[in-house]
Image: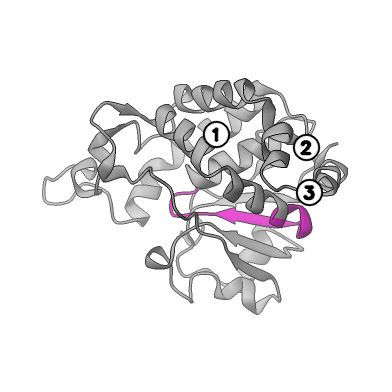
Amino acid sequence: MPLVNFRDVADNAGPRLRPGLLYRSARPTGLTAAELTAAAPGLRCVVDLRGPDERTEADWAAADALGATVRNLPGQGSPTDLAALPPGTTLGGLYTLLLDHRTAWFASVVAELADRLPAVVSCAAGKDRTGLTVALVLDLVGVGRADIIRDYTATAAAMPEVLAALELAPANGVPADRRYAGAAAVGGLLDAPEDAITAFLDALAERGGAEALLTRHGLPRDHVGRLRAALAA
């Protein structure tokens, strides 16, 4: 499949979100312009959150062919390198670290999306970086907690296909979590468990919610209004 873990966020985020504007995806494989047009008509931008060692120029060639902007916005300077995390770190704990240590980066990604809808936000699995970015956008535009959780956990059904696409599926009897560097240190990393996004949303609420947190770290207030005007039904 050229697009794995791909969906319109409005499919799961309830009636408060307009469809056809915000999409999420794992990395594409052999995607054609026709396939991308069918999946995301009118696409203006792809915001790719992967680092340079995770992507190739050909990954989003289909978007280039359609005249859509491809923006690479990898997170930088985080202390959350998986290999450095102690055993027993939960996925929700990792998400809280990301919220605290990549806040300005999240603000920059959300600002990019506000400027370029309809857009796809994407990373390797379309689960962690993508899932947290989407959760922040949904909180920002007033989507309820249950719908944010529903959107995140929808990835769980796609994880076998995601792992296969990332060449992380079990091979030669070696489980995927032993083949993924540092994954054993983070419980649930190869899944999309509800308790992980719940922990993230709890931490977000403790910090005042997405609007208060992101605007303190660089998201212009006019971008908040722009996102709400575009996405909120």
Q: In the image, is 232 to the left or to the right of 109? A: right
* Amino acid type, residue under disc 1 in the picture: Tyr
Write the residue at 65% across / 53% down.
Answer: 108
Q: Which residue is mark 1?
A: 152
Residue beneath disc 2: 17
Q: Check if mark 1's residue and mark 2's residue have beta carbons within 8 Å.
A: no
State the image coordinates of residue 196 (x, y, percent, origin top left).
46, 27
Which residue is disc 3 drawn over? 220
Q: Are marks 3 and 1 in contact (CB under 8 Å)?
A: no
Q: Depth-wise, is mark 3 or mark 1 nearer the camera?
A: 3
Residue segment shown in magenta: 112-127
Kind of residue indicated by mark 3 = Pro
* Place of residue 178 in the rendered image (x, y in percent of width and height, measured from the top left): 18, 43
Judging from the image, the colouring scheme is one colour
Q: Earlier in the sequence, mark 3 or mark 2?
A: 2
- In the picture, residue 67 is in which quadrant? bottom right
Q: Quadrant of residue 132?
A: top right
Query: Does 85 sit above or below residue 165?
Result: above
Residue, x 44% and y 33% (percent of image)? 192
Outermost residue to the bottom:
65
